[in-house]
Amino acid sequence: MKISKNERIWLIVVVILYLLYNFPGFPAYHQPVATVVHGFITVIAIWIAVYVGLGKVYKEYPLKEEEENK
């Protein structure tokens, strides 16, 4: 099965955000403001990217049950 353009972009975005989330030493330890900013930038961005990507991929590859019902 060939990877579509949407899937490729989705994968790249999620991997980049995941790497930013796990970047060592960021945010600086014992700084609550930096931790909250880091959380908003990475975790929320990852959630948005995953759900938007899932929506696009779902439109491209609908489930078999829906195809049979049409």
Image (spheres, rainbow, N blue to C red):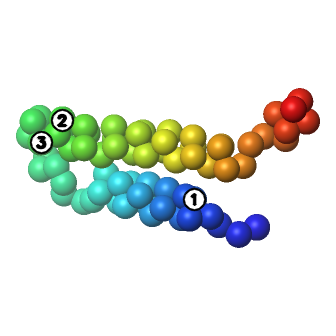
Q: Earlier in the sequence, mark 1 or mark 2?
A: 1
For the image shown, how many numbered marks are present on the structure?
A: 3
**Which amino acid type corresponds to the residue marked 3 in the rendered image?**
Ala
Which disc is residue 34 wearing? Answer: 3
Residue 8 screen position, x and y as percent: 54, 64
Task: Identify the residue at image location x=91%, y=36%.
Answer: 68
**Can you see residue 22?**
no
The residue beneath circle 1 is: 7
Distance between the Cα atoms at labels 1 and 2? 30 Å
**Which amino acid type corresponds to the residue marked 2 in the rendered image?**
Val
Residue 48 screen position, x and y as percent: 41, 40
Relative side of 6 to 62, left or right: left
Q: Earlier in the sequence, mark 3 or mark 1?
A: 1
Task: Identify the residue at image location x=48%, y=42%.
Answer: 52
The residue beneath circle 2 is: 36
Quarter the C terminus occupies: top right
Instruction: Using the rendered view, name the quadrant where residue 45 is placed.
Output: top left
Distance between the Cα atoms at labels 2 and 3? 6 Å
**Can you see residue 19?**
yes
Structural crowding at the residue carrying mark 1, measured as other residues with C-alpha within 10 Å and reported as few (<14), some (14–19) or many (≥20): some
Task: Identify the residue at image location x=82%, y=33%.
Answer: 66
**Is the C-beta separation of discs 2 and 3 under 8 Å?**
yes
Element on which disc 2 rests: helix
Quarter the N terminus occupies: bottom right
Distance between the Cα atoms at labels 3 and 1? 32 Å
**Which amino acid type corresponds to the residue marked 1 in the rendered image?**
Glu
Structural crowding at the residue carrying mark 2, measured as other residues with C-alpha within 10 Å and reported as few (<14), some (14–19) or many (≥20): few
Structural crowding at the residue carrying mark 3, measured as other residues with C-alpha within 10 Å and reported as few (<14), some (14–19) or many (≥20): some
Relative side of 35 to 20, left or right: left
Residue 37 screen position, x and y as percent: 17, 39
Residue furthest to the top in view is 69
